[in-house]
Every structure is written in C-alpha cells, then in structure tokens.
Image (cartoon, rainbow, N blue to C red):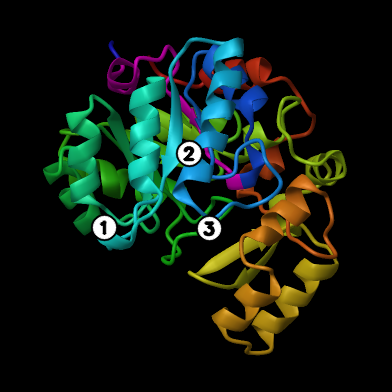
Amino acid sequence: MKNRVCEVLGITNPIIQGPFNWITNAELVGAVSKAGGLGVLGFNAGHSTAVYTGEETKERMRAEIRKVREITRNPIGLNIAPSSNVEQDIFTQPMLDLMVEEKVPVAVMVGNLAPYWISKFHENGIKVVFRAATPNEQNTREAVKEQVDVIVATGFDEGGTIPEKAIGTFSIISLIVDATKGRVPVMAAGGIADERGAKAAFALGAEGLFVGTAFLLSKESPLAENIKEQAIKSKADDLLMYRTIPAFYRSLPGELPNKLLHMSKDGATEEEIYKAQNEYVGMRDGMLFGDLTKGYASFGLGISFIHSIDSVETIMNRLMNGVAL
C-alpha cells in the first residue's frame, strides 16, 4: 500500500518532527530528515535571542537551512504562522521568498487557515501541511476546499500550545479523518511516542505522525540536559497544566511553573498568566537554558512512554515499527 503523506512530501517515513520554536536547530532537523522523516525548523531555530524584522529572520533562517544541507539533502520544512491581516504580516512573505531561494519544499502552517498564503505557496511549488490550533470539522472542510496537501489532527494530549477544546488525540483523529472524506491525508499529533501509539493512530485512519516530545528527548535535540533528565523520570501525571493565552499549557514542575499553576487556580486572567510566563520567551528560558525559575518546560502526555535519551534514528525506527505502510 502506498502512503499518501510520503508521496506528497517526498519522504520515506510518514513522520514529521514538530517545530518547537526555540528548541529546534540544524542538528535535530537534519537528523530527522536524514532518518527518512520531515525535519522542520521552528521560528527561532538555532538561536537564543529574538529578532523583530522579516529580513533578520530570513537571513538567520537561511544560515540554519544551509547547516541542515550539510547533514542531508532530504526534504525539510519551515514552520509558518501567517497573520490574518496580510498587509501587516511582516514575516510570511520573507519566509516564502527564502523557501523559493533555498528550495525548501514544505511549509508547516500553524494557527488559522490562510487561503491567500496557501495559494502563494502552491504557486511556488511548495507543499502545505496545515495544523489548526484547535482542529474541528469546519476548519478541516475549509482546509480541504483550499487544497492543502496534508492536515494534522492535534489532540489535547500534545505539548506546547494545547487546543482550546479538550478532545483527546484518539478522538480527534477519527473526527478529522471523517471530515476530510478521504480527500486529504491526515497526520496524528499529541502524545504519540512509541509504536503502540503509532499503531493506534493508523488504526483510526491517520496516514502519518506529527511528533514532538519524542524528538525533543533525543540526543540531537538542543533541549537543556537537565530538562531532558527531569523529563525521562517524569510521567504524564507529573505535568502541571495551567490556563494561559490562547488556552492551556503544560510544564514540568519548577519554581515558575508552580507559580503559574497557583495563579491559574487562584483566578488570574489568561493575560496575567501569559505575562508571568514571559510569553513564549519563557519556553526558551526553561527548555533551551534549563532555568525553571524563569521559564517553563512543555511536553505532551507521551512523556510517560519515554525512559531514555536515544538517537533520532532509534526513535524513528521505534515509531515506524507501529506504522502501517
């Protein structure tokens, strides 16, 4: 049986590495693509400081793409989060231009559906993987209409920015697969970290896996070593979940995450908690720098199934043992 995700994206294994903003770099992305999946560079890949112009962002990303090319010539992707206001979007056009210039074949588009940009990427021969922040039947049908190439069904089990609706991964897979009516392949995201999760996802109609936590806890990941060690000793029920913008976040316990949880329970607003977590910079401080006094460390519920820090190749093989091809 042919796998549509592999055919569309030009990869060997139907597995995409989640783009973790600060917590991606050329080494991790290159390792995933070299192992047959699709490595994806996040917004601040390979860096620990923020830039605020489209041109600076473009040139930093160009340098990281070229580092990946030293590891593998296999396909890679870039994470794209278009603004709903095209005229005020200062980042998406530079990223599109960069992808054309550097021959990056896949855009992983997160957030709201952006028909204008989907059309622009397609005009330039770039495939679009669409991942709604909160997947549902309506935005799935709209994505099919706009002819995205792959749709990601993200469940409440994921790490990072958790969907607004508390629908678990193995419930959302079937819902999104049914909504596509077979016209677009669906990948499963949220809590899938071993062959058992892979088998379950494919049994429910997924044709690929969108994997975050398992690759974060790899040898090649730039995640801070102390956070890796804490994570592999933790289970899903050790994670703290608190309200924030746009909905919820999970984190390993620590000084700041404990404070954020108390704020959430005590009725602080999402805006107050978001500010207290230092917005998305808190992810850098907690996960890249390993400082849970200033940041947080977000993982999905698949953390329960990870007990060692292995190579990307080992993790890829483990997942593929459960993939139906």
Residue type at mark 2? Lys
Choose mark 1 or mark 2, whichever is in front. Answer: 2
For mark 1, give the secondary structure: helix
- Which mark identifies residue 161? 3
Mark found first going from the N terminus, 2 or 3? 2
Q: Residue furthest bottom?
A: 267
Residue type at mark 3? Thr
- Residue pointed to by mark 2: 58
Q: Quadrant of the N terminus?
A: top left
Q: Residue at the spot x=54%, y=55% of the render? A: 52
The image position of residue 84, as x and y in percent, is 28, 61
Work out whether residue 203 can be spotted: no
Q: Residue at the spot x=76%, y=61% of the render? A: 295
- Residue pointed to by mark 1: 86
For mark 2, give the secondary structure: helix
Total marks placed: 3
The image position of residue 182, as x and y in percent, is 17, 33
The image position of residue 116, as x and y in percent, is 19, 49
Which residues are drawn in magenta? 3-21
User: Splitting the image into 4 quarters, where does residue 71 fall?
Assistant: top right
- In reply to whether residue 169 is colored magenta, the answer given is no
